[in-house]
Image (cartoon, helix red, strand yellow):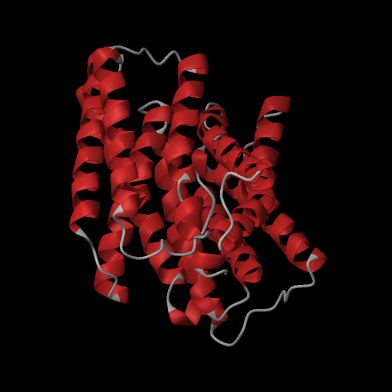
Amino acid sequence: MNSPTEAESLFTPRNFAAFLLVSLIWGGTWLVIRDQIASVPASWSISYRFLVASFGMFALAAMRREPLRLAPGGLRWAAMLGLFQFTLNFGFVYNAESYITSGLVAVMFALLVVPNAVLGRILLGQRITGAFVLGSAIAALGVALLFAHEWRSSPATLEEVLLGAGLTVGGILSASIANITQAMDGAKKQPFLALLAWSMAIGVAINTVYALAMDGLPQFDMRPSYSLGILYLGLAGSVVTFPLYYGLVRKVGAGQAAYSSVIVPIVAMVLSTLFEGFQWGALPAAGAIITLIGMVVAMRGRASAPPRRATPEP
């Protein structure tokens, strides 16, 4: 990656176009997930998604002439990512959307930077600044206001809203463990695309076993929108966006590229408003604005660059 003094501007036409495309694609994944779980158990939908994504990632690695085999010890790292990222994280997120709107899950997931920082401090020795703590607290207040609105306006009971929030927290913690795992020295020695591809394949195996045990034989929705959703999540949401995102990291630096984490929940909330009937008012508007301000403050106050992403947005 270029040093900070050599980094390009995010706002050159090519860089900004890549930034917007990544943010728009990842912002749209949350609503697509909602349709995926409407008629098929989450475990089977996750299995289909990452079956497509793993083949796509292997193909991308081959096209780039990157290694397909893992370095010694790589299977252990792939298994950890397969469990925490491509099984637990997505299992929590998919099921959370059965209880609360997709846009709210996306906004809450933006708080992933908080456990990333805490685990990074504990396991990697990364420093946490006062500005980061302040920004995180501001963002958490904004999310609390959004959840208060969800409880007041949604037909869901308080218990269901809290269950959706708890599942989202489970997804955030699982994703954070995966992010910190792949930031460790052993994981960083692995070919990145191959590590992702094998992690996804292991995740498919775990999800399939779980689905067979808990939901019975494979189920599939023959609607074109369901099949297109699988392709969108598996290919556009993973294989297409990764080269773009890491190209941005190399060109403009991890700090600027990470601002996609602010844009993604905005896109998700817009789509939730258009297609899920999310109702705006003073309380949710204030919550959304406070959350985004807190995210910007937290990211500007982050002492260390964010860890290498283990996965695209859910």
Q: Quadrant of the N terminus?
A: bottom right
Determine if residue 159 is in view.
Answer: yes
- Estimate the x, y position of residue 116 in percent, counting from the top left: 33, 59
Q: Is residue 4 above or below residue 257?
A: below
Asked whether 17 or 265 is in front, the reply is 17
- Estimate the x, y position of residue 282 in percent, counting from the top left: 26, 13
What is the residue that sits farthest to the bottom in this orientation? 72
- Estimate the x, y position of residue 178 in percent, counting from the top left: 42, 63
In this rendering, the count of numbered labels is 0
Quadrant of residue 24 in the image?
top right
Q: Locate residue 262 relative to residue 149 in the image: left or right.
A: right
Asked whether 20 or 8 is in front, the reply is 8
Quadrant of residue 97 in the image?
top left
Q: Locate residue 33 relative to residue 62 in the image: left or right.
A: left
- Residue at (24%, 71%) from the top-left corner? 122
Determine if residue 150 is in view.
Answer: no
